[in-house]
Image (tube, grey):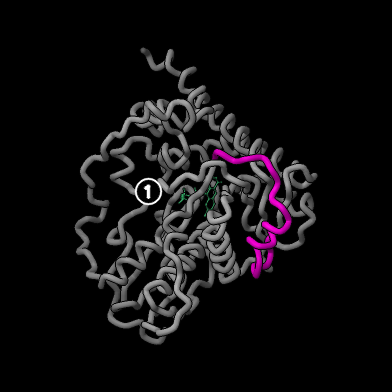
Amino acid sequence: MTRRKFWPLVGGALLAAGAATDWLVEHQPAGPEEAPADASRPAVPLVPDEQAILHLAALAPSGHNTQPWRITRHGPFQWVIGNDPARWLPAVDPTQRETMLSIGAFLQSLEYAAGHYGYACRWTLLATTYQSAEVAAVVLTKTAGLPGFDLAQLTSRRTVRTGYRNDALPAAAVRGLTAGEPGCHYFARATPEGQWLDAQTLAANHQQTYRDPAERELSQWMRFSNREAARHRDGLTPAGMDITGVAGWWVRHFYTPATVMEASFRERALTSAAQQVSAGAGWLVLTSPDRAPATLLAAGRRVQRLWVRVRAQGIGLHPMTQILEEAPFAGQVNAALGLAEPIQFLLRCGYVADYPNPVSERRPVAWFVHAGAAGLGTV
Ligand SMILES: Cc1cc2nc3c(=O)[nH]c(=O)nc-3n(C[C@H](O)[C@H](O)[C@H](O)COP(=O)(O)O)c2cc1C
């Protein structure tokens, strides 16, 4: 069958991803793990708890799964969390606002994982801008009597893009999820605000999809083949985007970064986005009191605290951030939602019929930990 003849099939299967075609999923083994680009760098020896805590921290979400964190180890349990410019997304996140949110989520995961292993975290903020190479220093100290943390909450968290039910979240469920967290606003789908978010998310998606620098940037973070996924251990894989079954097989074998720039790919992505916004309970919107680097990190921490809670309630979260990335939408969203404070996250949410397990890639700890001078000095 030629590629052209196969397109309609793939289109249909993409839309039905994960459903009737699952029997065709090809369990293609990942190739031998290839070394990262800087393989010549000697691995930094870590004690087992450090390895475990950093591995769990790195399960945090990040835009395009870039995993923008970079750790400098100044001694056992003495780390500087850095922001890696090679992992920025200048076309969709030119100010690195989303990078800071992702690193905030990483800090929260790190603290949860440290707590599980009996370590308290002492943090020092280092970032003065969203571009600061050093974001925060942390020293972990073994401490008795910490509350502890259920690691399954970290290891089972994931972005859920498909499989939502349409019933609204009861007010009590929203209150339970957002308890103790400021700046969380829920808009049910049927409200004018929910409808505005649905429609404008699609409009902003359309604009971004046809903005070539943004689409080219996306193409650079796509890991279509198993080989590319194993080589990079980051970015967006077909499985991570819920493209499974025969469509997943086709995409893994025949798509390349160049495919992303084709009109047919862009149109299919928009069809998927339309299907996504047509399902779910509504939107969870997170605001922050200001735009300071510390406030952005706190917002990233907050989204991660919510994200690890939702699965136990059968609720999924799906950031759809194009409104915040594209003009004029970014300038209109506060007025449309009646919110005064800066909006940091727009998350589609809802009950998930059959909650999927995490599938997105993560780099091994050794790839993002670097050796630093002994001791954290005056930090
Ligand atoms: C700041 C930020 C922005 C994101 N924006 C989007 C988005 O616009 N669309 C989307 O499908 N996922 C978005 N995501 C989800 C990431 O793609 C996801 O976290 C990443 O691929 C890792 O997958 P996981 O969350 O399942 O571990 C965003 C995540 C973060 C932290």
Q: Is residue 133 magenta?
A: no
Q: Is residue 197 left or right of residue 250?
A: right
The image shows residue 302 at horizontal and vertical percentages of: 58, 65
Q: Is residue 288 left or right of residue 117?
A: right
Q: Give the magenta part as a residue range.
A: 162-184
Residue visible at 57% across and 49% down in the picture? 316
Q: Is residue 221 left or right of residue 203?
A: left
The image shows residue 287 at horizontal and vertical percentages of: 67, 61
Which residue is more in the foreground, 275 or 2? 275
Q: Is residue 95 visible?
A: no
Compared with 155, 207 (above or below) is above
Which residue matches tag 1? 361
Disc 1, SS: loop
Residue visible at 36% across and 26% down in the picture? 254
Q: Is residue 313 left or right of residue 290?
A: left
Chief secondary structure of the magenta portion: loop
Q: From the image, which quarter does the C terminus lie in?
A: bottom left
Tell me where residue 310 sits by quadrant: bottom right
Crowd rating for badge 1 (residues with CA inside 10 Å; few <14, some 14–19, many 20+): many
Tell me where residue 303 sits by quadrant: bottom right
Compared with 32, 343 (above or below) is below
